[in-house]
Image (tube, helix red, strand yellow):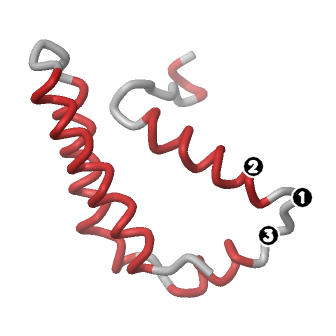
Amino acid sequence: MVGHVELRDDFKEQAEWRREKAEQYPDDKRHLEAAAIFDRLAATVDAIPQDVFIAFSKLEVDDGLLDVERWTEVLRDVGFRSWLCENEI
């Protein structure tokens, strides 16, 4: 089961990776913006109730690999893709 530590580690690793990319691509400000988002997410992980992690771990999944792929896609989109709220469409 994924918990607070694993989620925080994911967010911290993503923040660091985005900072490295920001050095490689200094004209693309999205990397630094994404790193800041991941820093905020990492700082707030402890506010997530443990029962949310338990409920999440009980979700039925047909293929664990697909979950990893989806999670990777979500992480990759942070700072690069925005989602409009229904009332903004």
Local crowd at mark 3 within 10 Å, few (<14), some, or many (≥20)?
few
The residue under the point 45% across, 36% down is 76
Rendering coords of residue 24 (x, y %): 15, 24
Local crowd at mark 2 within 10 Å, few (<14), some, or many (≥20)?
few
Image position of 21 with respect to 4: above or below: above
The residue under the point 16% across, 40% down is 19
Residue that numbered label 1 is attached to: 62
Residue that numbered label 3 is attached to: 59
The residue under the point 12% across, 13% down is 27
Q: Earlier in the sequence, mark 2 or mark 3?
A: 3
- Amino acid type of the residue tagged 3 in the rendering: Leu
Q: Nearer the viewer, residue 89 or 1?
A: 1
Q: Nearer the viewer, residue 4 or 72?
A: 72
Q: Secondary structure at mark 3?
A: loop
Rendering coords of residue 7 (x, y %): 43, 69
- Amino acid type of the residue tagged 2 in the rendering: Leu
